[in-house]
């Protein structure tokens, strides 16, 4: 049985456990793929922790579901297929997906700058996406999700929904759910009444409709405007306690897309104005009169986030950089001052070049309400050897140390005063 903290295993490194920390059978980690350096979510299964004779099928359920749904644009991409951990044959199994790096609906709905029109557009797309998943061709049963909630539904770049957590989905007539399988308390709040009272085995596609409508209702619950109130009323058609009286997804889509609720579905993607905490892959952001597309999130902390960004000029990708965003005014102003001082030193060996800085702190403008610095992300960093490593990551680290030391000295000076 696997014990202790796991930092590196199979094809993944820098692992950090997320989710239920007491589950010995199924562990979920966020980390980095050793070969490609992509951010991934790794699912690790300890077969020795379960006595069920169908433990292999139970472990494989999530990966098998994702494999069936890979043609859909609304599910995460598989990175590693379901397989044994080489060091633990017959005992540990794993698979991994590319980390969507997108906020959950629960988190995104807290962003006040996500307006009602955009929320309604997301709701429409989520309804159509679930309809697409429900239409998945299976041999003997209908596909049933059984795990839709504000924490499992993500908001991707430019508002597409991303469904995650397929560990409870039904893709065959064979019973492969663990006898102990159940929803968490938070997820149970979005579950259909029959799934709560009779168990997950009683859930069908109508239960998914209930869960989706309950989840999407969170988008409009705190908004007083007429469009939000109307959207809530339309979603209530899928919230009847009796499954037979719930509206079909096609009817719900038609209601949400009625002429008086038309939105910006045909509009071209524009530069976003959401808070930097919610940026995800594909978002287009503006900085110093230049456009950058978010490629991935490199890392995050309590003070800010670092992103891999691609500069876009006249529809063409022209450069890859690392961009740092600070969340709060106090730490943002200190960081700006530190990077101004560091700029003249970044032409030295082992220091990443600082290309641009925000001119000032401005909390009201869509993008510059956060402070930013952009440093070079070299090709060497993209192609770094997974065993020996390369100097590019060291270069970035040395620049970060220079800045961090200056920030700490500012804090000490401030406290002394």
Image (cartoon, helix red, strand yellow):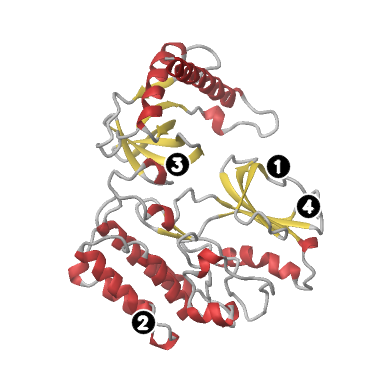
Q: Which residue matches tag 1?
A: 8
SS assignment at label 1:
loop
- In-front residue for pair 64/48: 48
Looking at the image, tell me whether mark 4 or mark 3 is earlier in sequence order: 4
**Quarter-of-image position of residue 124:** bottom left
Q: Earlier in the sequence, mark 1 or mark 2?
A: 1
Residue 360 higher or lower than 210, as above or below: above
Q: Is residue 142 visible?
A: no
Label 1 vs label 3: CA separation? 24 Å
Label 1, label 2: how far apart the Cα atoms are: 47 Å
Residue drawn at x 33%, y 73% is 235
Q: Are marks 1 and 4 in contact (CB under 8 Å)?
A: no
Q: In this figure, which residue is indicated by the disc labeled 2?
A: 247
**Residue 270 in the figure: left or right of residue 303:** left
Residue that badge 4 annotates = 2
**The C terminus, quarter of image:** top left
What crowding class fits label 3: few (fewer than 14 Cα within 10 Å), some (14-19), or many (20 or more)?
A: some
Q: Considering the numbered disc 2 on the image, is that residue within a helix, a strand or a loop?
A: loop
What residue do we see at 42% from left, 11% from top?
Answer: 344
């Amino acid at each position: 049985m696997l014990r202790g903290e796991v930092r590196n295993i199979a094809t993944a490194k820098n692992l950090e456990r997320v989710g239920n920390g007491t589950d010995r059978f199924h562990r979920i980690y966020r980390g980095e793929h050793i070969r490609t350096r992509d951010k991934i979510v790794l699912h690790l299964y300890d077969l020795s922790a379960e006595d069920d004779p169908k433990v292999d099928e139970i472990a494989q359920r999530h990966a098998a579901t994702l494999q069936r749904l890979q043609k859909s644009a609304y599910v995460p991409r598989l990175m590693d297929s379901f397989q044994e951990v080489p060091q633990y044959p017959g005992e540990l199994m794993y698979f991994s997906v590319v980390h969507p790096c997108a906020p959950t609906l629960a988190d995104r709905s807290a962003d006040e700058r996500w307006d009602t029109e955009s929320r309604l557009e997301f709701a429409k797309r989520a309804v159509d996406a679930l309809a697409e998943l429900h239409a998945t061709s299976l041999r003997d049963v209908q596909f049933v999700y059984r795990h839709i909630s504000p924490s499992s539904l993500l908001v991707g770049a430019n508002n597409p929904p991303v469904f995650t957590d397929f560990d409870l989905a039904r893709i065959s007539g064979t019973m492969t759910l663990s006898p102990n399988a159940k929803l968490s308390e938070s997820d149970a709040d979005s579950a259909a009444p029959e799934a709560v009272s009779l168990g997950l085995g009683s859930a069908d596609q109508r239960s998914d409709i209930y869960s989706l409508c309950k989840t999407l209702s969170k988008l409009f619950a705190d908004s007083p405007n007429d469009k939000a109130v109307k959207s809530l009323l339309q979603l209530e058609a899928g919230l009847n306690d009796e499954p037979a009286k719930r509206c079909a997804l096609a009817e719900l889509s038609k209601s949400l897309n009625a002429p008086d609720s038309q939105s910006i579905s045909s509009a071209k993607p524009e530069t976003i104005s959401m808070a930097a905490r919610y940026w995800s892959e594909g978002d287009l952001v503006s900085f110093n009169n230049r456009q950058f597309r978010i490629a991935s999130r490199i890392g995050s902390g309590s003070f800010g986030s670092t992103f891999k960004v691609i500069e876009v000029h006249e529809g063409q990708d022209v450069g890859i950089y690392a961009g740092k965003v600070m969340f709060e005014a106090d730490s943002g102003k200190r960081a700006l001052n530190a990077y101004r001082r560091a700029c003249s030193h970044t032409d030295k060996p082992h220091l990443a070049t600082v290309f641009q800085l925000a001119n000032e702190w401005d909390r009201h403008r869509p993008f510059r309400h956060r402070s930013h610095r952009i440093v070079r992300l070299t090709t060497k960093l993209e192609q770094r050897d997974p065993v020996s490593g390369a100097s590019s990551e060291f270069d970035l680290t040395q620049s970060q140390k220079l800045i961090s030391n200056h920030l700490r000295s500012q804090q000490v000076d401030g406290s002394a005063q």
